[in-house]
Amino acid sequence: MRFADIGQQLRAYRLESGLRAEEIAARLGVSRAALYRYEKGEVIKLDTIRRLAELLKISPLSLLGIGVEYFSRPIAFQERLRQVEEQSDQILQVGGAFCYQTTTEAFDGALAEAWAEAADAAPERIPARAAADQAMGLLTARKKLHQSRRANIIAMLSETALRGFLAEGVAGSLALSERTRNRCRQAARDEVESIATLMESVPIGLQIGLLPTEPAGSFMVLRGRERAHVCTSPFPADLTASPAIGVGTITAADEAVSVHQRVAEAAWRNALKGPAAASRLRELLQEAAPR
């Protein structure tokens, strides 16, 4: 029984629900101190596992890693994704406009400015700023984790997603001032140029390709020494602090991992790579250049 995994799901639920720790502890019939111990991976009694499964509205089998975890809030999904990445040695990404772990400081700077501006304009400014800070902290933790672990990454990006990224910029769904939106567009252009450079140089442990056929949906396969997970999500990293509508999923079910692995391998075989992919990205940059 993987108590550490159960603890991670419990922490993700706390972020997802917005409930205070003492409220969750009361619903489980344990103390707040015990709740924190469970989140850290300490042994959980079977009757508490049953109550936790009821609280999360999933089956006990799902809680034990056999089923599917669902996330309706981007920030909770990012926290759970960070937890999975913490145990991963290989990451296969299919779809999206960028691979967050390889993004530049300029990307993070534009994103932080966009989120701060959107939060300041929100009806409830203080909670919005707190959510933006928490989201930025999660993304920073993911990037630092990758820099320390150096998991092998194979990312296959979507041309359609890249076109949208160049047109709208970082955090493209947010209503921003023209000055901030222009900064976000410039950050997106710089990011695409950086991706093209990485495609040409092929750093150790990182391969990026361009998909000639648009994927029906984005997903990631994350493999660690003991298990693998499949993550699907409508929430790109630059929407973590946004009130996005959608559902993300994470599962370690063998059948799900196998079929997504096969699809990812087939996509990689057909993807544009190296100088050809970099050349295509620079064509997209030229098409999106301001007139």
Image (cartoon, helix red, strand yellow):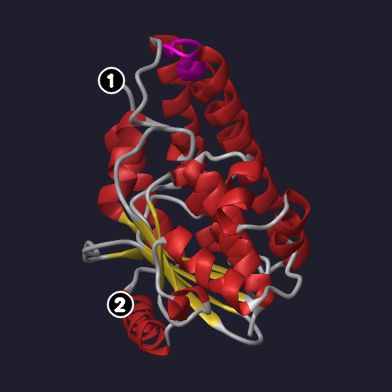
Question: Is residue 205 in sight in this rendering?
Answer: no
- Is 75 above or below relative to 156? above
Going 27% across and 62% down the picture, which residue do you hit? 217
Badge 2 or badge 1: first in the primary sequence:
2
Numbered mark located on residue 270 in the image: 2
Residue found at x 73% / y 69%? 41
Image quarter in which the C terminus is found: top left
* Closer to us: 118 or 102: 118
* Front one among 150 and 198: 150
Number of other residues with Cα within 10 Å of mark 1, as a class: few under 14, some 14 to 19, many 20 or more: few
Position in image of residue 143 (x %, y %): 66, 51
Q: Is residue 120 magenta?
A: yes
User: Would you identify the image quadrant in which residue 12 lies?
Assistant: bottom right
| Residue visible at 34% across and 38% down in the picture | 244
Q: Amino acid at mark 1?
A: Arg
Relative horizontal placement of residue 144, taking residue 138 as reference (left or right): right
| Res. 26 mark | none
Q: Which stretch did the figure color magenta? A: 117-124
- Expressed as whole percent of the image width and height from the top left, the position of residue 168 reads 33, 30
Left or right: 158 as drawn, with respect to 91: left
Q: Amino acid at mark 2?
A: Asn
Q: Would residue 142 be found to the left or right of residue 216 on screen?
A: right
- Image vertical order of residue 108 relative to residue 78, above or below: above
Residue 103: horizontal and vertical position, in percent? 57, 47
Q: Which residue is mark 1?
A: 291
Q: CA distance from mark 2 to mark 1?
A: 33 Å
Q: How many marks overall?
A: 2
Query: Where is the N terminus found, in terms of image quarters?
Result: bottom right
The foreground one among 238 and 230 is 230
Q: SS of the residue at dot 2? A: helix
Vertical position of residue 181 compared to residue 133: above or below: above
